[in-house]
Amino acid sequence: MIDYSVYMMTPTFSRDETPKAYAKNQVSEIWTLEKFAKHIADHNGVYSRGTVKGVISDMCECLVEQLLNGNKIQLGELGTFGISISSEGAESIDKFTAKNIKAVNILFDPGKDFENMIDRADFNPVASRAAQIATLKAEKAGESTVDLAAAKGGSTTTPGTGGSGTGTGNEDTGSDGSFG
């Protein structure tokens, strides 16, 4: 089940300045390698959590090694890993050196297991993170109302006046700064 909240945002590359409603997924939990390895081991039963964790760790080390050797790695149904590089421009080809290269970026092209995920997904609408935090804070303080516009960084209104806050588009960040 994918939880999502809806927020208003003006599309960055749109000529239309009218804000529109968009969905943003909310991450339920961040799984560590340890937890994911245990989950895999529990599903298959043949390999222990430690074995699964070791294989994944070794795979990551080898994946990095081969990407840095300029190779693409195809991992079947998982997908294909590759790299791209980002560079700073030079005045001419002759003046371009490796020092102009500023980043090595990981590319991932999902495999067949990741196709048509929309057809397999279930969605659950939930309040934004800002609304959840404001509600919990009000509940702990014994308050019976919450000013959602203030919680979302918009203008506050007096109840019954019909005003609304606009928000910034970043109301759904978690306490760790991540979206969702």
Image: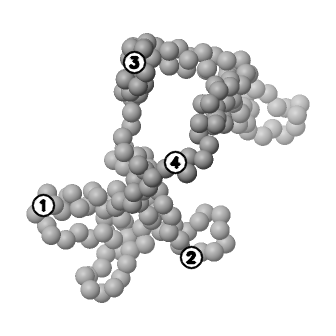
Quarter where residue 145 is shown: bottom left
Tag 3 secondary structure: loop
Which comes sooner in the sequence, label 4 or label 2? 2
Which percent across, then down, holds residue 13?
65, 64
Q: Secondary structure at mark 2?
A: loop
Q: Earlier in the sequence, mark 1 or mark 3?
A: 3
* Residue occupied by mark 2: 18
Residue shown at the point (31%, 62%) measured from the top left: 131
Mark 2 or mark 1: which comes first in sequence?
2
Kindly identify the amino acid type of the residue bearing the numbered disc 2: Thr
Kindly identify the amino acid type of the residue bearing the numbered disc 3: Gly
Q: Residues under labels 1 and 4: Cα distance?
A: 41 Å
CA distance separating discs 2 and 1: 37 Å
Residue located beneath label 4 in the image = 120
In the rendered view, does 35 fall on the left or right side of 71?
left
Please tell me whether mark 1 sits on a helix, a strand or a loop.
loop
